[in-house]
């Protein structure tokens, strides 16, 4: 067993037609999202251009799905709530965009859970959806490319 086998759920119930296994915490998009978040948090926000605009207001929101969803799906898999190791399906991404939008933009902002200065911003929910859509497309690139080359992967 590899040294990072604890990152991947057991058993590896992967659909036979798909050779692509979602790597959860070892996923490249997850790792990129973590690195982008860290650069934004500890370096970019200290610069003039990082204190205003997209980096300040929406970058973390766009990163929400690629940053948090792999861990949530890993936990779902460990608890038996997810029966496969394929990349996230559109419904999984959409469900979490919806749940987190309600939590962050309504519940937490209304009742000041976690942060006293939380405010509801519908543009944040849009950023979650945009980030989720981009993440879903990246996670499913292999599926799209196999369809365009004439192979069936459904």
Image (tube, rainbow, N blue to C red):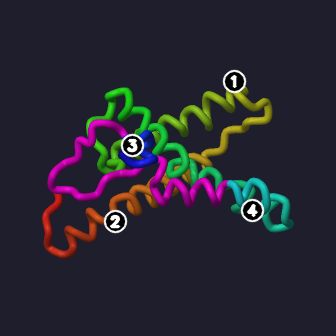
Q: Which mark is residue 141?
A: 2
Q: CA distance from mark 4 to mark 1?
A: 26 Å
| Mark 3 crowdedness (10 Å alpha carbons): few <14, some 14-19, many ≥20 | some
In the rendered structure, which disc, 4 or 3, sits on the residue that comes first in sequence? 3
| Mark 1 crowdedness (10 Å alpha carbons): few <14, some 14-19, many ≥20 | few
Q: Nearer the viewer, residue 115 or 120?
A: 115
Determine which quarter of the picture holds residue 102.
top right
Residue position for label 1: 111
In the rendered structure, which disc, 2 or 3, sits on the residue that comes first in sequence? 3
Residue position for label 4: 53
| Mark 4 crowdedness (10 Å alpha carbons): few <14, some 14-19, many ≥20 | few
Q: Nearer the viewer, mark 2 or mark 1?
A: 2
Helix, strand or loop at mark 2: helix
2 and 1 marks in contact (CB < 8 Å): no
Q: Nearer the viewer, mark 4 or mark 3?
A: 3
Q: CA distance from mark 2 to mark 1?
A: 39 Å
Residue position for label 3: 8
């Amino acid at each position: 067993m590899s040294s990072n086998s604890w990152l991947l759920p057991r058993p590896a119930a992967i659909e036979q037609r798909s050779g692509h296994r979602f790597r959860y915490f070892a996923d490249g998009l997850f790792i990129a999202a973590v690195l982008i978040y860290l650069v934004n948090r500890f370096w970019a926000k200290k610069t003039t251009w990082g204190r205003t605009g997209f980096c300040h207001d929406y970058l973390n929101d766009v990163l929400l799905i690629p940053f948090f969803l792999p861990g949530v799906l890993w936990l779902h898999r460990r608890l038996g709530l997810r029966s496969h190791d394929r990349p996230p399906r559109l419904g999984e991404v959409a469900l979490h965009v919806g749940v987190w939008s309600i939590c962050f933009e309504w519940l937490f902002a209304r009742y000041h859970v976690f942060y006293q200065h939380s405010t509801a911003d519908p543009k944040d929910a849009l950023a979650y959806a945009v980030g989720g859509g981009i993440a879903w497309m990246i996670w499913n690139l292999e599926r799209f490319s196999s369809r365009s080359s004439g192979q069936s992967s459904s």
